[in-house]
Image: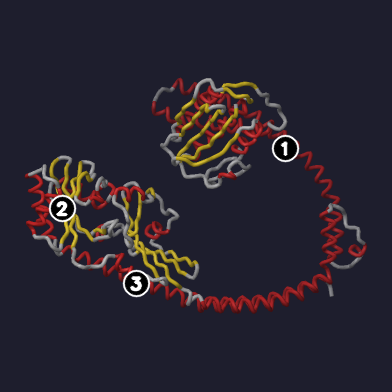
Amino acid sequence: MKLVHKIYLLQLVLAFVLFVFLGFTYFIYERHYKKELMQYIYEKTENQKEKVFQLIREKTKRMKQNKRLYLSIHKRALELFKKNSHQSLAELKKQLIDEFELKNITIELYSIDKKYIVFETTYKQDMNLDLSLISDAKLYLDKVKKDKQIHLADIVTIDALDLGYLIYSYAYVKDGLYLELSFQDNRKHESFAQLFEKSNTKKETTRLFVIEKNQNYWRYYEITSKKDLDNKEKFFQNLKKFPTGRKSYNDKIIDAHLLHKTFLDFENNYAHVVTPLYDKDMFDTIGYINIVMVLDIDVAEKLSVLQRTKQIFYISIAVLAVLLLFIFFFIEANFTKKIERIVNSMKNKKTISEASILSSQDELSFVAKEYNKLFVSLQKEIKTNKVLLEENKRFIADTVHQIRTPLTNIMMNSEMIEKIFKDQKVQSFIDQINASINMLTNSYEDLAYLLSYDTFEYKVTSISLTLILKERVKFFQTISKVNFKPIETRIEDSVAVNMNSIECERLIDNNIANAIKYATPSKPIQIVLKKEEDKIILEFRSYGSEIANKEKLFEKNFRENDSKRGLGLGLNMVKIICQKYDITFGVFYENEQNVFQYVWNS
């Protein structure tokens, strides 16, 4: 039997066993895991949703029953406040409690300035709270500012810290001064935290997050656990913010609302469900854009089906192992050893000369003979390619050289255009052209250095690091301007180092270019040159997210952000220059800035 026939027979037998095995296991997986597990998770999720809906309806109805009373209290509070503006809010609160005999209702008072900031209150957690960043509060403050009427909110709010149910009313006092009251029904009723505290167990936990939005960003916070904080403003400031304008944020809680999507993950025998309660903006109804529920369900029992499937896998693997072992010895006896000898000849880069292989009348004999022919042909091709590679390198070098003249011509013409056309409408286009020219010039200089640094001798002299740094900052001003990333400098005078001026420029240029490329817009790029004892320190500071792979940053062709296109050679070039001159270099994160630091030892 020919070798090819033996292989075909083995392939057919192995394929049949594998197909039967995979078909059976897939059927078990499909039937038990998907059907039972997914239905179980769906029912649990819907049950928890209904609990939340019922509680929202109940609390909204209860709070709105006292609407007339709340308006009367606020009207009286406004009269007393205007009558005696020197009276403290605490005194006013006590007077209202006594006058209205408030036993089951807690009230709090807030004085608000023209910027909608709470500057006096009986509820100390809200002191200095900026209400302009809270959607419902800003809505009603804008209304009372316009019509000078008392407005009671149509929606019930859950306090972000103590999770109590509140309804707020707002009134205009005078220009730049507003009076806000909050009302809380003290009769026994459950909060979301209390509701789920009873039902949460090791096997099932539920958390709720409210989604808020203003003109600038999204944010969310949990309403099923109290926060041990004494200042709500600080709490809101520390919340993670998501700038508006994007379709998704790689954050499941925000994305669940934006995409109207339920996320389901499995980890450590738990199903982790993240789902929005509503499929639309609910601000006018519940006071929040949406509520997102995070549900962790113990599905260990359901996953026992998978365990049984694994047992089937193990039995099947054992059968396959025995079968494959048999096939292994069969293949080894018939052609593996011959293949090894052929491979060894290939590894040693020599022709196959064994007569037992070349004289056999099977496919391996044909492969060996063809390899010998290709080997001889390949040696000829290698010689040819070496010549072509050298020619290609010379071509690139010539091309870089040829770019200099047209680039210089473009720069000169750009300067002439700038002198002739003084119109500010044209200036922005000229700035864009100049920025592009400077970027191209910088890339050209990088490429020219990379082509020559290992063949050309760059002589070392004493140079003024102060002057070169100022010149390069001036060179990049146009680029930073069009990118809305201003450059700020603190450069000490008369700082000199021993190195080649061209290599010094490459080090500086690549750091400034990287800062402009990756820094946060509208925030300054800071360049610092200073002397400290026997050291010279040069730092490039830029605001942005912390660099994750600092240890790989100076490697060749590495890019921290693949969305930012580039050669990926700049920082590797900086590394080469630093190693040549024994410059200590590194990257660290400080005060929300990525800091590239270079240190010369005097």
On the image, the x and y values in percent for residue 512 come to 52, 33
Q: Earlier in the sequence, mark 3 or mark 2?
A: 2
Q: Amino acid at mark 1?
A: Asn
Whole-angstrom CA distance, mark 1 to mark 3, is: 73 Å
Left or right: where 375 falls relative to 242: right
Up/down of 20 relative to 145, above or below: below
Q: Secondary structure at mark 1?
A: helix
Up/down of 247 relative to 482, above or below: below
Residues packed near mark 3 inside 10 Å, few (<14), some (14 to 19) or many (20 plus): few
Residue plotted at (48% across, 67% down): 266
Quadrant containing the C terminus in the rendered view? top right
Q: Which residue is more in the foreground, 373 or 519?
A: 519
> Mark 2 against mark 1, which lies toward the viewer?
2
Q: Amino acid at mark 2?
A: His
Q: Which residue is more in the foreground, 324 or 310?
A: 310
Q: Earlier in the sequence, mark 1 or mark 3?
A: 3
Q: Which residue is more in the foreground, 442 or 392?
A: 442
Residues packed near mark 2 inside 10 Å, few (<14), some (14 to 19) or many (20 plus): some
Q: Which residue is mark 3?
A: 199
> Mark 1 against mark 3, which lies toward the viewer?
3
Q: Which residue is mark 2?
A: 151
Q: Secondary structure at mark 2?
A: strand
Q: Which residue is mark 1?
A: 392
Left or right: where 12 falls relative to 490: right
Q: Earlier in the sequence, mark 2 or mark 1?
A: 2
Mark 3 near mark 2, Cβ–Cβ under 8 Å? no
Residue plotted at (57% across, 32% down): 599
